[in-house]
Image: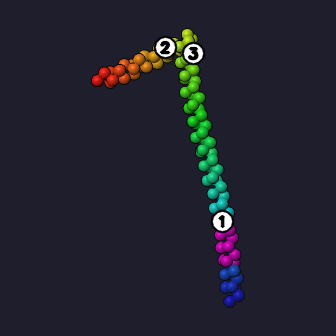
Amino acid sequence: MSELGEIVDSLENKVSKLLHKLELLSLANQRLEEELQTVQNDRDLTKNSVLLWEEKYESLKLANSMLGSDNNKTEAKLKINTLIRELDHCIAQLAE
């Protein structure tokens, strides 16, 4: 009978250790999920910032080409033509 008692005690001890490990792993998992969320938020902010700077860069390139810079004259002409077509379309819609 004492052998059976030792086995039960051993199993209880092992179950207790497993439950403790489970709790520690759950806490670690929760911390990692929070860290992941923080990193994803930072990535989204950085992505938005990059998009904003790219838009500013494109606007600056266009402004420079309109001021007479030879580097992007064709791009400026294409942009102006696009804007004129959009204006013509709007005027046509207003005329209807």
The circle drawn on residue 36 is: none
For disc 2, the marked residue is 74
Where residue 17 appears, x then y in whole percent? 69, 70
Residue 22 occupies quadrant: bottom right
Q: Please determine whether, in this image, residue 79 is positioned above or below residue 44.
A: above
Label 1 amino acid?
Answer: Glu
* Amino acid under disc 3: Asn
Instruction: Tell me the quarter of the image containing the N terminus.
Output: bottom right
Q: By what rule are the colours in the image chosen?
A: rainbow
Q: Which residue is mark 3?
A: 64
Q: Position of residue 92 (x, y in %)?
A: 32, 21
Q: Residue at x 66, y 60 (%)?
A: 27
Q: Which residues are magenta?
A: 10-22
| Marks 3 and 2, the one that precedes in the sequence | 3
Let me know if residue 18 is in the magenta part: yes
Determine the secondary structure under disc 3. Answer: helix
Residue at (36% x, 19% y) in the render = 88
Task: Give the quarter of the image for residue 24.
Answer: bottom right
The Cα atoms of the two marked residues, 1 and 2, are separated by: 64 Å
Q: Which residue is mark 1?
A: 23
Query: Which secondary structure type mostly characterizes the magenta part of the structure?
Result: helix
Q: Residues within 10 Å of mark 3 (few under 14, many from 20)?
A: some
